[in-house]
Amino acid sequence: SSSLRSLLHLIEFREFFVTVDHFSLWRRHLSWAKEDGGKLKTYIVQKFATNMVFMSLLLGAELAVLFNSCSVTTDMRAQMRGHNYGRTEFWIGLTIILSVVFTLFTLLSTFTA
């Protein structure tokens, strides 16, 4: 019992929740950012622009699949209109719709960040 307590005293209380000392990492990051903030801003803007382009392309592909006129997607939309929960086409269509919604939320959150 006493040996267990002595082992617990080796670890600080915050290390039960935070295992890595992020404070030194954060200080290095801040010092790096303050040295050349223009490069950091350029990098972040490029990252957001890349995310916007990728999410826009993904949204276009999802909507093209959802509103395609081929027989498979027409059957999928018919199964969804008929509320045929037992059919695979219904669940595929629902998954595509959820993906469209999540992609729209991702675009919105990236644009407003």
Image: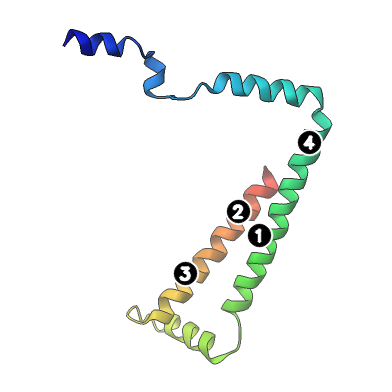
The residue tagged 3 is: 95
Disc 2 to disc 1, C-alpha distance: 7 Å
Disc 4 to disc 3, C-alpha distance: 36 Å
Residue 92 image point, x, y percent: 45, 75
Q: Residues within 10 Å of mark 3 (few under 14, many from 20)?
A: few
Element under label 2? helix
- The mark nearer the N terminus, 4 or 1, is 4
Tell me, yes or no, whether the two marked residues, 2 and 1, touch with CB atoms within 8 Å.
yes
Disc 4 to disc 1, C-alpha distance: 21 Å
Element under label 1? helix
Tell me, yes or no, whether the two marked residues, 2 and 4, touch with CB atoms within 8 Å.
no
Tell me, yes or no, whether the two marked residues, 4 and 3, touch with CB atoms within 8 Å.
no
- Position of the C terminus, as image quadrant, is top right
Residue 13 image point, x, y percent: 37, 15
The residue tagged 4 is: 41
Q: Which mark is residue 106?
A: 2
- In percent of the image, x 66 and y 48: which residue is there? 110
Which residue in the rendered view is the most extreme toward the left?
A: 1
The residue tagged 1 is: 55
